[in-house]
Image (cartoon, helix red, strand yellow):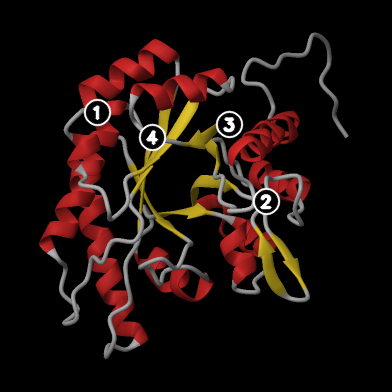
Amino acid sequence: MKLGIINGWDEASFKYVADLGLHAVEFCCNFNYDSMEVAGHVDEIKSFSEKYDVAVGSIGRWGETRIDSNGEIIPSALQHDKNLIDAASALGCPVFNTGCNWTEGKTFEENCAIAIKYFGELIEYAKGKNVKISVYNCSWANFVVTEKEWEPILGALPELGIKYDTSHCLGRGGDYLHEMIAWGNRINHFHIKGSMYVDGRPYDDPPAGLDQVNWGAVMNALYTKGYNGMLSIEPHSGNWMGVRGQWGVEFTIKFITPYIMPEDYTYNGSPYMP
C-alpha cells in the first residue's frame, strides 16, 4: 500500500505532496472543473510527477449529473469521464472514480439498469488502457453506495470496483467493517478520513487518529482482503484549517504510516509462522 493525499495537479501541489514525504496524489476533477484541465495537460502533469517522484494514484469526478430526467446518459458528462480515463491512462494512474445519479420516476430496478449501462460504457472504454473503474460510496450525485446497490450492479459488472470511505458508511449508520469484509475484494481505492459522532449525530471529520474509526481493524480488513492500492488522505473538516489543518495532515501521516508494511520489507531468517 502507498500513502498519498488529495491535492491539485499544478506544480505547487506536487511539491507540497513531496514535501510531506508522500509519493502519491489523488486528483478530484469534480463537476465544477472542465475535465480538460487535467486531460489537456497530461504532458505537463507527467513532468511534475517525475520531477517530484509523486505518482498519480487516482483520478475521480464527483458531483456530476450523468443521467437526465428521462433516464438517458448525458453525452457531455460521459465525455468528461472518458477524458479523465484517457488522462489516467496517459499518467499511469490505475483508478478512475465515478458515480451515477438517481433518476426520479424510475424504479430501483430501472435505476440499477441505467447505472449498469453507464458504468458498462466506461469499463468498455477503459479496456486496454490499464485503468480500473470504481464507483465511490459517497451519495453526492450517486446512489450506488451500499450493498443494496452493489449486489445487482457490481454483480452484473465483475470489472467494476469500489472507492471506499468509512465516513460515508458511518454517515448512513452502517457497519464499515462488515462492508469492507464482504466487499473488500472489489475495493480499488481507499480514503483516509476521520469521523466523529456525538449523540448519534455527526460532529466532525477530524484527522485520522483523532476520531472514532477503528483504524487498526480497517487496515486488517484491507490486508486480509488483499488490498495493495493507494491510501488517500482526505482533509475534510472545516474545524481543521490553516495551521491546525496542516498539523492535522502531518499527524495523520505519522498515525497511518506504522500500519503500512514497507514495500521493501525483508526478513533474514525463518519468517514467523503460527
Q: Which residue is the extreme one toward the front?
A: 242
Instruction: Tell me which numbered mark, 2 or 1, is placed earlier along the sequence.
Output: 1
Residue 139, x across and y down, in percent: 45, 68
Q: Could you say which disc has been placed on residue 90 in the image?
A: 1
Q: Amino acid at mark 2?
A: Pro
Residue pointed to by mark 3: 3
Residue where numbered disc 4 is placed: 8
Q: Amino acid at mark 1?
A: Ala
**Cα–Cα gap, marks 1 and 3:** 22 Å
- Name the residue carrying label 2: 206
User: Is 154 above or below relative to 98?
Assistant: below
- Which residue is painted at 42% across and 69% down in the image? 144
Mark 3 residue crowding within 10 angstroms, few (<14) / some (14–19) / many (20+): many
In the picture as drawn, the residue positioned furthest to the left comes out as 75
Within-10-Å neighbours for mark 1: few <14, some 14–19, many 20+? some
Indicate which disc, 1 or 3, sits on the residue closer to the N terminus.
Answer: 3
Q: Nearer the viewer, mark 4 or mark 3?
A: 4
Q: Crowding at label 2, few (<14), some or many (≥20) Cα neighbours within 10 Å?
A: many
Place of residue 136 in the rendered image (x, y in percent of width and height, measured from the top left): 44, 57
The answer to which of marks 2 and 4 sits earlier in the sequence is 4
